[in-house]
Structures are given as C-alpha cells and as structure tokens.
Image (spheres, rainbow, N blue to C red):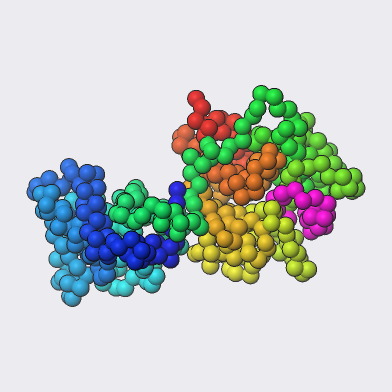
Amino acid sequence: MKLASVKEAREIDARTQSEYGISSADLIDRAGRLSAARLFAAYAEFLEAPNFAVVLCGPGNNGADGLVCASALRELGVRVEVVSLSDLKSASDLEALGKKIRDCSVVVDALFGIGLNREIESTAREVIQRVNESSAKRVSLDTPSGLDSETGVVLGEAVMADLTLTFGVAKRGFAVNEGPRHLGRLEVLDIGFPIELVKRVASTTIGFDRKLIRKFLPRRHSSGNKSSYGRVQIFAGSAGMGGAAMLAGSAAARSGAGYVVVTTNGRPKDVLAEAPEFMTATLDDARVFEKPKWTAAIIGPGLGDKAGEVIRRVRDASDSPTVLDADGLSALAKSTAGLKLPPNWILTPHAGELSRLIGVDAKTIEGDRFRYAEEAAKKFGCLVLLKGFRTVVSNGQRAVVILAGNPALAKAGMGDVLSGMIGGFLAQGLKPFTAACLGAAVHGHLADEWVRSGRDVLSFQPSDLSASLPFVLKSLRGLK
C-alpha cells in the first residue's frame, strides 16, 4: 500500500496540472462527484426521504470538494444542507448548526484538507465536537478534519469518521498515531492523477500489509537441509536474564533458521533453561569471534554489561547482518566513541530507547515517528526499526509502516521475540530491510490474531508469540 507525505501529495496535485493539463477545477469536480457516488452507495438507506445530509465546508479546495459533493448528491435525489464555516458568526448560528447535525443522517466533513498543520480554532473545534457527538454517519473528504495528515497527530480536535474518502493516494499520517482511530473505513478514490506520476512521486513510504508478508515469507525447497537456512548467532542472556535469550532463540528457530547458537554472558547452564534445540557458547570462547560461521547475529537481549564489547567484536569479526536490541541499544547510547555501524545492521528501539540514542524526548519522537526513524537511520548509517503502535522501519531515505499490531504487545519480552524473528529471516537470506519489515509485520499479526480469536488483550505473553507462530505463519501464507 502506497502512502504519500503531504509534500508528495501536493507535488502530485501540482504536477498533474502543470505536466498533464488537468486543471484544479477538473480535479475538484472529480473529487466531489466521486465522493458523492461512493458515499451514496455506502449509505443510500440513510439518505432516503425524509432523511437528509449536512455538508460542512471550510476554506480552500477541501471546501470546494464539499460543494461539488453536495451538488452531486442533490442530483441523486438526496436532500442536502450546506453549511460553511464562514457562515457561523454567532452562538445562535452554532446552535442552529448543532440541531441540523443532530437531526441529519449523514454528515459530510469537508472542513480542512491535508495542508492543515495548526491547532483547530474555537468555532471549528465546536463544530467538530458536535459532529463527533452526533449519531449520524460521518464521511470525511480526503482527510478527517483536524488530523495532521503527515504525523497522525490530532490538532486539538479531529473528526471521528466512519468513512474517509481520500483522493489519489493514502497519506502517511493515516497509518500512525491517532490516524487509524479517526479514519474509520478508508477508501482511495482515483480522481485522475496519472498512475505513473503517483508511482514516481509517492515513492518513500509503504504500508506493509498481508499481501507483502505473503510475498516475502521464506519458502522451503524439498532438497534443502539445515545448512540451507542459515545460522543465527544470538548474543544474549546473563544471570537472571536467561528468559530473554530463550525467547529470542525460540523465535529465531520457529522463523526458520537452520541453526540457532546462543552465546551467553555467563555459563549457559546458569543462563538457559532446558533448550535442547540450541547450541551454546560463552563470550569467553575466543573461537566464537575468530572464525565466525553465522549468517546473521543478534546482540542484546538480557546480555548485560558486556554488550558494548560484543558490538565491537561482532562488527570487526563479520560482515553479516546484525540486529541490535535491548542491552545492545543501551550500550550504543552510552558509547562516546561515535560508533559507526554497518549499513546492514538493524537497530530496534522503542521511543524511550531512541530518545537516549538521538537526544530527543520520547513524546516528541512519538509525535512524528517517520521523521525520527529517518533521522536516526541517517545518524547511525543503518536501518532503524522504531517499535510501538504502527512500527516504522527506515533506512534514512524511505520508510515502511507496519499495518498490524495492538496493545497486547505492550509487555516486557515482546521485543526479544521480534529480534529473534528478524534474525531468523536474515539467516535465511532475506535482505535486512525486508527481514526487518517482515519480522515486525508477522509479530504484529500474532498479536492481532490473539485478540481476534477471542482472547483478552491483557493476557498475551511473549512465549505465546512463539507458540502461535506456526499457525499464524500458515495462515499468512494463505494456506488452510
């Protein structure tokens, strides 16, 4: 699923006019008429007489879209009342509008478009509040008014749409923060932007969905053997922190890695519970680094105070892709040597960890997840996977947002499983960007499936991820 930044969406609009000779008036006419046809198809039963629709129009092109939509609805036989923000000059005007919104069956929101980047002011805020309080079906044109289409942040107040009809391409703020909660059902309308232009301009952000999971999941060949599917070297676990190593190792194995080797900070028997499927080593064993056999490495889960040393030794010993998580990220944040990482390494911080890595507070990072994932990737010269609601993966030039996951994942140990899954996919030869996205997407779908199957969101445990993985992988492949 393609997603456009606000800058890209504006460029598509402008170049459609300047390079393809399609006027702004033509685009507005198409947007309004297609919106009317689509919402009529969706809510025809609510628009039969004596029911009526209210179309709320703001300034600029979004309001113009609304006016065309209202006209087209009338042509379809719908009773429509149009109210412009500029008409609301007194408290009595607001009260009259409030009654219309309470009495109507459909509200069309054409107040503000994707260019909105400031807090909603008092009159508009009251209007949006009344819309959200109504029982009418709420349809937003291009974007729910009050939602920042770049970041997904609510600018004071935003329409809670039942249906969002966006034009040409989905916007990347729809996928993060409050965006998904305010969209309702999203439909992308083709209003005449040339397909080749959209592909060329909206090229930096993708939503990773089930279709892409199915495309990239590794496959087994009948002639393959364990050596065909790689070796994951997991540097994890120390006294009292063996669970992290177990979780990462189990996830790597269940994701398909041919070999899993857990190298611990301490004696393996003291760190790991029974895990007959893992080979083990210790950090004191020089042979681990002298002739590395791994095809992918993971550094950090429960590793403790040796993480910084391991980062340097792994970097110097091998050019294999490496996942850096947990204690590995803490060690990187404490490094004063300006440690430069290889481009095939993957950092997997949540907002708090990224805050320590780049010196920006976590709340600010959450407010613009794309921006700070991109900035961190540029700073460290490698991939950054910013965990959280709608995980973002970036290499500094392009970004992928994971369209899966829910609050069931908000529990210690979930990140250890994610690291193991990514490591397992890397070991099988997937490119780092693909492995990171695939791991995060499957991880999110595991949580979604847990909730969808009727189990409570509070009850999900990290070990449930690995236990559910065989069944969810089969489902994601499209197999019965």
Report the label total.
0
Residue 121 visible in image? yes
Residue at 48 percent across and 39 percent down: it is: 211
155 w.r.t. 244: above or below:
below
267 w.r.t. 70: above or below:
above
338 w.r.t. 465: above or below:
below
Which of these two is toward me, 19 or 320?
Answer: 19
Residue at 41 percent across and 53 percent down: it is: 196
Residue at 55 percent across and 30 percent down: it is: 474
- Residue 74 position, x and y percent, is 12, 54
In this picture, residue 142 sits left or right of residue 399 = left
- Residue 36 position, x and y percent, is 21, 52
- Residue 198 position, x and y percent, is 41, 55
Magenta portion: prevailing SS class = helix
Q: Which residues are magenta?
A: 303-328
Which of these two is toward me, 295 or 101?
Answer: 295
189 w.r.t. 5: above or below:
above
Which of these two is toward me, 350 or 55?
Answer: 55
Residue 62 visible in image? no
Question: Is 180 a magenta residue?
Answer: no
In this picture, residue 392 sits left or right of residue 195 = right
User: Looking at the rendering, which quadrant does residue 343 occupy?
Assistant: bottom right
